[in-house]
Image (cartoon, rainbow, N blue to C red):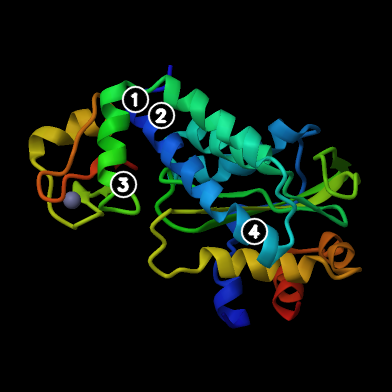
Amino acid sequence: MRSQVELLVLYQDILLMLDEAKHEDKCMGIEVEGVEKLKKALEEVAKDIQQRYIRMFERLKTRYSHPLVPVQEDTCLGCFSKLPTSYHERGRNDEGIFTCENCGRLLYWIE
Amino acid sequence: MNNGEFVSYFKEEFFIPKLKSKKKKAVLEELIQPLVNKKLIKSQKLVFETLLNRETLGSTGIGKQVAIPHCRTLAIPEICIVVGVSEVGIEFNASDGKDVQLFFLILGPPLDESNQYLPILGKLCERLRKKTFKDKLVKAESYEKFIKLLAKG
Ligand SMILES: [Zn+2]
């Protein structure tokens, strides 16, 4: 089972991939024909994410290009503020969804 | 990006001179493995799935028996490149239908401070489209020779 935060990572990764598809095709000559298929894959991932998190993600998307940011050394790499110690353990184990108290972005512990 | 910068992204510990895999999915997993061993990736499954999604967009087998599986993912903290060579070649839905012998796995974070992910990808694509370049690289007897060839272009 993929956790909600892992699904959000996939969701954001696919969005970025769709964004860069044109560049790959035009500037690097890598044929990109599967845009529609990938959009379907994105829908499939979205289906498994709770609606409230999708809404949160989309709301943040209006402010930030990357609503979901990595956490390294217990620091939000979106705004570089330290996260409360109470987050650390659960965050690292992908238990639940956490947002940065300072910038509001969604968080993914990469270590 | 100059040649020195370009080759600085390659590491001997991320060089697999003899890939064991025979199939597309398996080779992707094999290429990710060294990064998992070095604890650069927390979730192997997540990276694997993102790479498969990228292949949905179109095969990264760019022809001439070369593939550059790549993606940006939040699951990786820095740009990582893994090189793998398959003696026999692996079916990879490449654009020219040929089996792939030489693999360059490129992973980059979405927030790429140095902004080098696309330049690296571009540079590799450009060099690997040259006719005999792949043959030379595959025949390199050591990692050192491989990197020298790659740097020369
Ligand atoms: Zn923050």
Mark 3 residue type = Lys
Alpha carbons under labels 4 and 3: distance apart: 23 Å
Residue type pointed to by label 2: Leu
Between B139 and A23, the residue placed more toward the observer is: A23
Q: Do badges 2 and 1 share one subunit?
A: yes
- Say which amino acid is labelled 1: Gln
Disc with the residue nearer the chain's start (1 vs 4): 1
| Residue tagged 2 | A7
CA–CA distance in space, label 1 to label 3? 18 Å
Is B68 left or right of B114, judged from the image as shown?
A: right
Which one is earlier in the sequence, the residue at label 4 or at label 3? 4
The answer to whether marks 1 and 4 sit on the same chain is yes
Q: Mark 4 points at which residue?
A: A24
Mark 1 C-beta to ligand 1 under 8 Å: no
Which residue lies under the disc numbered 1?
A4
- Give the percent coordinates (x, y) of residue B26: 70, 32
- The single residue placed furthest to the top in the displayed view is A1
Q: Are marks 1 and 3 on the same chain?
A: yes
Q: Mark 2, mark 4: which one is toward the viewer?
A: 4
Q: Which residue is drawn at 88% across and 44% down?
A: B99
Disc 1 or disc 3, which is closer to the eye? Answer: 3
Q: Do labels 2 and 4 share a chain?
A: yes
Numbered label tally: 4
User: Looking at this view, is B31 or A91 the one in front?
Assistant: A91
Image position, residue B42 (x, y; %)? 41, 37
Helix, strand or loop at label 2? It is: helix
Residue B145 visible in the picture: no
Identify the residue at horizontal 44%, vertical 20% (top origin).
A47
**Residue of label 3:** A61
